[in-house]
Amino acid sequence: MALYVGVLGFFVVGNAFMTWKAVRLWRDPAVADFFEVAFTFLPFGPDARRGMVRSANITVVTLWCVVLLLLTGSDAGADDPVSLWIVVVSVLIILASAVCEACVILFNAPKFAVPPHMRAEPGVFGARRARKAERAREAGA
């Protein structure tokens, strides 16, 4: 029980911090640097890390659904239909968020899910295509 409370407390405090930072990212372009530094440990390139910064608000939604799963889905023997619906809806939101997050990282779409100051940036595929075209122009010139 203590482990459960500790994990739940960790998620709630961590999610509160991430929510605060994601709201600040939506309003202030300078917060993007904080997120980029936070994602430097990941083995992806700078384009993918920038895409993860663009999708921070989707990550926050996903993590809050994980908290809901921890709160309602912990009692496997419960016959409560409300808890069952909360678990089903949370899992569906997590799956939809995963697809949306992949789209934001790879294509920078849908635009409504991206902070306004980052909507003009290319996704991973767009950035790689631009670099490839640039190298082709340099080689042909």
Image (cartoon, helix red, strand yellow):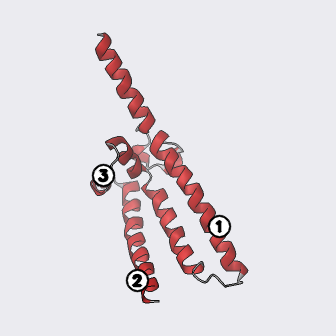
Label 2, label 1: how far apart the Cα atoms are: 25 Å
Disc marking residue 2: none
Disc marking residue 36: 3
Choose the circle earlier in sequence order: 2 or 1: 2
Q: Quadrant of residue 131?
A: top left
Give the side of residue 100 with respect to residue 89, left or right. left
Q: Could you tell me which secondary element the residue under label 2 belongs to?
A: helix
Measured from the top left, where is residue 126 in percent x and y? Answer: 43, 33
Image point 40% across, 83% down: which residue?
6
Residue picked out by circle 1: 89
Q: Could you tell me which secondary element the residue under label 1 belongs to?
A: helix
Choose the circle earlier in sequence order: 1 or 3: 3
**Are the residues flagged by discs 2 and 1 in contact, CB closer than 8 Å?**
no
Image point 35% across, 48% down: which residue?
49
Choose the circle earlier in sequence order: 2 or 3: 2
**Are the residues flagged by discs 1 and 3 in contact, CB closer than 8 Å?**
no
Disc 1 marks a residue whose amino acid type is Val
Does 73 sit above or below residue 131? below
Query: Among all residues in the image, which is located at the extreme top?
Result: 141
Does 75 sit above or below residue 91? below
Label 1, label 3: how far apart the Cα atoms are: 31 Å
Disc 3 marks a residue whose amino acid type is Glu
Does 5 sit above or below residue 101? below
Measured from the top left, where is residue 1 in percent x and y? Answer: 47, 89
Measured from the top left, where is residue 21 in percent x and y? Answer: 36, 63
Disc marking residue 6: 2
